[in-house]
Amino acid sequence: MNSLLDLLLRLALWLLLAPLLPGIINKVKAWVAGRRGPPVLQLYYDLARLWRKGVVMSTLASPGFVAGPALAWVAVAGAALLLPLGPAGAALSFRGDVLLVIYLLALARFGTAWAALETGSAFEGMGAAREVSYAVLTEAAIIAAVLALSVQTGTVSLATMLAPSAGAGAVLLAAGLFTVLLAENCRVPFDDPNTHLELTMIHEVMVLDHSGPLLAVILHGASMKLLFFALLLTQAVTPIGGWSRPVAYMMLAGGVFAVTVGVGLVESLLARFAFRRVPLLLTTAFLLCLFALLMAWKGGAL
Amino acid sequence: MVNLMVGLAMGLNLVALGTSRLPALIRAMAMQGVALGVMPVLMEHEFDWRVGLVAAATVAGKGLLIPSLLRRAMRAANIDREIEPVIGLVPSLLLGAGATIAAVALGHLLPLLPEHAGSLLVPGAMASVLTGFILLIGRLKAISQVCGYLILENGIYMFGLLLIHTTPLLVEAGILLDLTVGVFVIGIIVDRIQRAFDSLDTRKLTALRE
């Protein structure tokens, strides 16, 4: 009974906190540009509004059109429950859970791409192709980062991997994971969440034909993914296991906030890259994570 | 702590290889210089004013003076900021990564003192030297070749850090002075090349003419 309550509490925390992050990013962007900007809670209003709307379905679409976003959302939520929250630990933790997390994230991407292809539109197919081709490189980077953490700590369970700091490669790992975060969440140097220019859209193309509750599910899943990566980055880099509970929670919250503000600043100060330069940046991110792995292998502790 | 700085230097090697703009290349090199300058202070257990002096001189020289000289040369020569690589950006990144992996994997084969066995200084130094070589070979603009040379020198400096207790302070200071004068001279030469050839492309310097 107690564990069920714990699970529900965690799920509620993830569901309710996640839409805050895009709001903070937009606020930072508005602040840098000297505007007032939308309220921080804007995404909550959007989600509520979308949830009440109806759905427009293509006559071509099979049930996969609905199942795709749902699958993606459930996969991200599952990955979120496996991620430990500092001293509170994860809802479910076992040996090798990190592999399941990587596969759940891949499954979420498959779900979104599948739903995009279901519309039968060539444009959405193009978006899905772009998203998946970036994902090839980011996944390599994530796997290198996870290997670095696992070599550093000598375990394959997220709870023990994330507790100590990343050792000598911490700076490299932070830079690599931050780039991965930007790419995975379709933020600015890779993709512009506000763009509606056909030639440059990536993620927005895929969700173009979704409406109403389906779009709400996709948007909420995207914000959960952002929170997931922010938490992963914070815990991977900082030695969060070595502190007492209140300090650890403060560090966790502060880290997520810092990452979010960082994303906002990157988005205000950088223009998005041309397509041909994106693989270069992603390769750099992969190599940074690979170097972190090398340092974990040879360098040991600080 | 030193290993953290070596990691930072390795990451900056990658950034230097991957960037396509001259100012970004100079910035990466300057940050590497600062990271290198901080290293001797971190290596000491108790603070020694001579080590502090070396650190301050290195940060000032490599982090501020040399980059500002290069930036001035770049502005004076009025060149465009795009780097023209002979070896493409992704291939040079991969070459640099291969060099770093080789340096880390083979670093322990060198006969080192036992107290340096766990340190990443030797692999970091070799990686920086090799990165400098790749930049020297693979870039056409004179200023980016200077940056390659400086990154190579950063690698040699990292090797020198292993001997910080046995090298006299005067030698360190002399090296720094040499380097600054070298960059100063290169800055003037860059200006001359620009005036004589209307470009900094070193390909134009290969043919002899009367």
Image (cartoon, coloured by chain):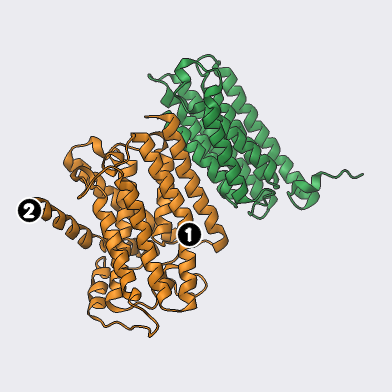
Chain colours: A orange, B green
- Residue under pointer 1: A134
Between tags 2 and 1, which lies in front? 2
- Which amino acid, by three-letter code, is at mark 2? Met
Q: Residue at x 25, y 51 (%)?
A: A82
What chain letter is assigned to the residue under label 2? A
Task: Give the secondary structure at mark 2.
Answer: loop
Quarter of the image with the N terminus of chain B is top left
Q: Looking at the image, which residue sits at the far bottom?
A: A59
Tell me where residue B187 sits by quadrant: top right
Q: Quadrant of the C terminus of chain B?
A: top right
Q: Nearer the viewer, residue B164 or B10?
A: B10
Q: How many marks?
A: 2
Which residue is the site of mark 2?
A1
- Using the numbered discs, state the Cα–Cα distance from disc 2 to disc 1 in whole angstroms: 43 Å
In the image, what residue occupies the spot 66% across and 36% down? Answer: B184
How far across and down, in percent of the image, does residue A205 sit? Answer: 44, 73
Say whether disc 2 or disc 1 marks the residue closer to the N-terminus: 2
For the point 29% across and 78% down, the residue is A212
In this picture, residue A222 sits left or right of residue B122: left
Identify the residue at the far top of this view.
B166
In the figure, A161 relative to B107: above or below?
below
Q: Residues within 10 Å of mark 1 (few under 14, many from 20)?
A: some
Asked whether the viewer can see residue A271, the reply is: no
- Determine whether A122 is above or below A301 in the image: below
Residue B81 is situated, as x and y percent measured from the top left of the image, at 63, 54
Q: Chain of mark 1?
A: A
The kind of secondary structure element at disc 1 is helix
x, y percentage for residue B38? Answer: 46, 30
